[in-house]
Amino acid sequence: MPSPEHHHRRSRFAAPLALLLFFACTLAAIAASPAAGQQDKGAGVTLSAETSAKDVGLPLYPGSRRHKDRDEDSPGANLGLWGGGSGFKFAVLKMESDDSPDKIASYYRKALAKYGTVLDCSHPPAKDAEAEKNASETQLTCGDDKPEKGGTLFKAGTKNNQHFVAIQPSATGSLYQLVYVAHWDADKKK
């Protein structure tokens, strides 16, 4: 029988994925039938359990393998929705390795650096409401993101184009997740 912690890890992504799926289907239906008088600027939906290193924008740790909590699970998810110049993309890939979390953390700290400053949300600075308020519109912060107990969480990029790496110790080494989240809005580009 799975432990309560195991169930918590599985349910942590279940609700957001269900919400994203609902959101994607709803917006796809709206985008497929533009309002009278509006020009269709193209729309699309991506929904796949197949995810690659290219989808998350990060290399796979050498010697690692895809991780499934159960045989019927998928080690990844790739969701996207766009239309009228706006959209979002969400990609996640769950992996495992026999190496220690420290080795994997060192590897991904370097890999994430290509996206800018790497934030260690495992040990974020004390929350400063004034600093968060004054942060630029694109500046990435840890916000309320934090790792599971005993884990590590890194973030890099901008608020609209984020890369996350979450690392957790396991009985045989480490579990880690690579996450990419992007969103864009045509109205904000003007």
Image: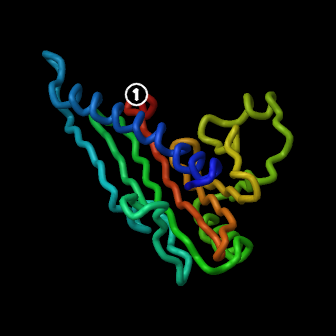
At a point 15% along the width and 25% down the height, the residue shown is 33
At a point 69% along the width and 58% down the height, the residue shown is 118
- Give the percent coordinates (x, y) of residue 157: 59, 53
Residue sitting at the far bottom: 63
The answer to which quarter of the image holds residue 159 is top right
Q: Residues within 10 Å of mark 1 (few under 14, many from 20)?
A: few
Q: Amino acid at mark 1?
A: Asp
Quick one: 175 or 105, which is closer to the camera? 175
Compared to residue 34, the image places residue 11 above or below, namely below
Quick one: 2 or 113, which is closer to the camera? 2
Q: Is residue 3 left or right of residue 39?
A: right
At a point 74% along the width and 53% down the height, the residue shown is 149
Number of numbered discs visible in the structure rendering: 1
Task: Label 1, secondary structure: give it.
Answer: helix
The answer to which quarter of the image holds residue 102 is bottom right
Compared to residue 161, the image places residue 36 above or below, namely above
Residue sitting at the far top: 36
Query: Quarter holding the C terminus?
Result: top left
- Give the percent coordinates (x, y) of residue 104: 66, 73
Residue sitting at the far front: 1
Tell me which colouring the rendered structure shows. Answer: rainbow
At a point 58% along the width and 60% down the height, the residue shown is 115
Query: Quarter holding the N terminus?
Result: bottom right
Judging by the rendered image, the residue that carries numbered circle 1 is 187
Compared to residue 166, the image places residue 17 above or below, namely above
- Give the percent coordinates (x, y) of residue 103: 70, 77
- Give the percent coordinates (x, y) of residue 32: 17, 31
